[in-house]
Image (spheres, rainbow, N blue to C red):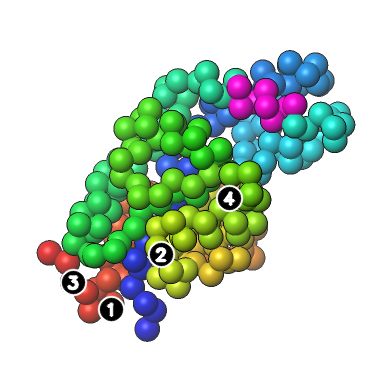
Amino acid sequence: MSQPIRAVFFDLDGTLLDTKTGIVEAFRRACQDLKLSPLPPADAIAREIGPPIGEMAKALGLPLPPEAVDELVARYRAHYETMGPEHSPPFPGIPEVLEGLEKLREAIPGFVLGVATNKLTPVAERVLDDVGLKAFFDVIQGVDPDLRPKPAPDILTRALQRGGAQAETSIFIGDTRGDLLTARAVGTRSGLAAYGYGAEAVPPTLVPDLRIERPQELLVYLHQTLAGCGEALS
């Protein structure tokens, strides 16, 4: 019998928030600053959201020399900082799911809610605060100077450490191949946010423990898991 889940960690872009518009616009502006051409169309950029900015540029075939990657990243971040909350609304159902998870946290001692994202930690905190979701989370962990971005295990591992959570009783929810590989590397259960914009690129051979078509399905899964372990909640 699987151990009951005691921690839920989320990716941010494409999982909690629909940040596609802001990411695409900030990326296009950064490319224009560096006079990169031809400029990829918005839909092509959107399909590459998830990996670090330098990897996105490479996947899009942009003529970016290695020594210019840091400049592109810096300009992207500067433009993204100017984007308001209208560019990163929660996906429908996410606020209600977080309210349900908050009730689980109140009922189960030590239950942890967290975020593990490739955004810089202060940026992730600001974006979540802008849309009124920051207070739901015990841990918001992004890229720090000593951490490699996902799919390396560093960010999620640090998030678990900060929350006092164990991998075997945690689940990581994300919308990309990199998120599923991160969960596998750390040893948590994995959930694919199939409603996110990265899910279509996940290969069928990479099977998550849970596929979520709508955010509300996560709550159903958690309650079923708890019931299966003999932990009924009122």
Q: Secondary structure at mark 2?
A: loop
Disc 2 marks which residue? 165
For marks 2 and 1 on the same chain, the one whose residue lies earlier in the sequence: 2
Identify the residue shown where x is 64% and y is 49%. Answer: 146
What is the CA distance from the residue labelled 1 to the residue labelled 4? 29 Å
Contact? badges 4 and 2 (CB < 8 Å): no
Which residue does the numbered mark 1 point to in the structure image? 229
Q: Secondary structure at mark 1?
A: loop
Q: Earlier in the sequence, mark 4 or mark 2?
A: 2
Extent of the magenta region: 71-78
Label for residue 176? 4
Which amino acid type is marked by label 4?
Thr
Q: CA distance from mark 4 to mark 2?
A: 23 Å
Crowd band around label 2 with a 10 angstrom C-alpha radius: few (<14), some (14–19), many (20+)? many
Which label lies toward us, 3 or 2? 2
Which amino acid type is marked by label 3?
A: Ala
- Residue at mark 3 to residue at mark 4: CA–CA distance: 32 Å
Would you identify the image quadrant in which residue 28 lies? top right
Residue 75 quadrant? top right
Residues 188 and 97: in front is 188
Q: CA distance from mark 1 to mark 3?
A: 8 Å
Residue at position x 28%, y 77% from top?
Answer: 228
Residue 70 point in image, percent of width and height: 75, 32
For marks 1 and 4, the one nearer the N-term is 4
- Seen from the viewer's position, the closer of residues 214 and 97 is 97
Residue ID for mark 3: 232
Residue 178 in view of the camera: no
Residue type at numbered disc 2? Ala
Inter-mark Cα distance, 3 to 2: 21 Å
